[in-house]
Image: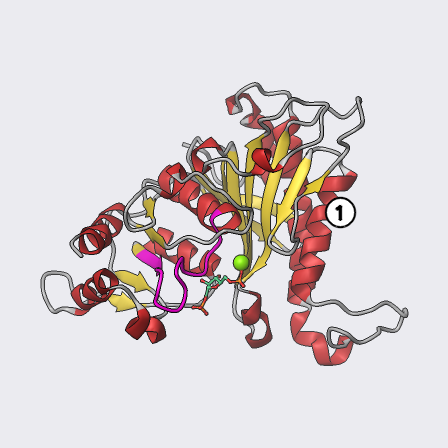
Amino acid sequence: MQKKNKTLGEFIIENQSEFQYSTGELSKLINALRLAAKVVNHEVNKAGLVDILGQAGDTNIQGEDQQKLDVLANEKFIQTLKNREIVCGIASEEEDDFISINSQDELHQNKYVVLIDPLDGSSNIDVNVSVGTIFSIYRRITPVGTPVTLEDFLQPGRNQVAAGYIIYGTSTMLVYTTGHGVNGFTLNPAIGTFYLSHPNMQFPETGKIYSVNEGNYIHFPQGVKDYIKYCQQEEGDRPYTSRYIGSLVSDFHRNMIKGGIYMYPKSSTASNGKLRLLYECNPMAFLAEQAGGKASDGYQRILDIQPTELHERVPFFCGSRKMVEKAEEFMQAR
Ligand code: AHM
Ligand code: MG
């Protein structure tokens, strides 16, 4: 069991040996994400001052264009990773295509690709509700020294070597896994340091919270409708509590701590739901499994899906193991 109060920097160094084929590269990569997280955190915290500092599209006092926060977060993460020359490729929700880095340079034999949703739930920023960054890391499949290809990004989620999120909430946290459990670090904003605050995070086996956009109920498959009715029935420990922030990172984080299920099913208006497999569902699924939870598309394990496109969507059921199993039962009965 990890002791609380150590810094993320100390934790990364102490646990470097758990990385397979460790050369320090993955540690440096997580360090870079930690740095970008602090920069983005600073920007997100200023969001409420938008009337004072200027709207997106305005020009600020230095003559710089004000940017939308999701665009800015995208730039900060990409810049930080590029500057440190520690990845060979990046894919982002904000970029149509993947970015290849140092592909021709013999000196930079980087082996990792990063997939990122720089600011998930960004429609929540205007109303001062928590948003997050999600990241997923893979070892490339193609040989080092050659340019990365789409194949390096289209790997099933079970190949991830690390994944995590940053939640810009009442406090800012970085939560990640390298396949050896899930640990959460809280930022002390006074000194800009993340401290281990939530060692070995675990989803309760079952819970009492269901999180889904019930406004879409009419469009949901019958299995999802049946499961929602089951959650609302008065029997045993039910009815469950409904909690939906509309910010995947925040809904997931709460459910991991308290026990619950998050659902973004397919519907008659969105045949694969809304969430993206590669940089939303896969990293959350990896974290969920590492924390004893489960993630499914209703029929199969998210981490076993072979992706075919960078921005593909997938129905998503994720959270406490027994709750996801129950939802699957309802899905598969129809
Ligand atoms: P985004 O990547 O455009 O921010 O969309 C993803 C977000 C998730 O964080 C959230 O769970 C979901 O969209 C909410 O969608 P909806 O408003 O349809 O319920
Ligand atoms: Mg998103």
* Residue that sits furthest to the bottom in the current view: 51
Please indicate, yes or no, whether residue 171 appears anywhere in the rendered image.
no
x and y percent of residue 110 in the render?
69, 27
Return the residue nearer the eye: 165 or 103: 103
Residue type, mark 1 in image? Gln
Q: In the rendered image of this protein, does residue 230 appear above or below residue 133?
A: below
Q: Residue at x 67, y 52 (%)?
A: 38
Q: In the rendered image of this protein, does residue 202 appear above or below residue 228?
A: above
Return the residue nearer the eye: 195 or 254: 254
Q: In the rendered image of this protein, does residue 6 appear above or below residue 224?
A: above
Q: Quadrant of the N terminus?
A: top left
Is 86 left or right of 1, judged from the image as shown? right
Q: In the rendered image of this protein, does residue 129 appear above or below residue 35?
A: below
Return the residue nearer the eye: 67 or 275: 275
* Residue that sits furthest to the top in the current view: 21
Is 244 left or right of 24, judged from the image as shown? left
Return the residue at label 1. 79
Q: Quadrant of residue 131?
A: bottom right
Q: Which residues are magenta?
A: 261-277
Q: Residues within 10 Å of mark 1 (few under 14, many from 20)?
A: few
x and y percent of residue 187 in the render?
59, 51
Q: Quadrant of the C terminus?
A: bottom left
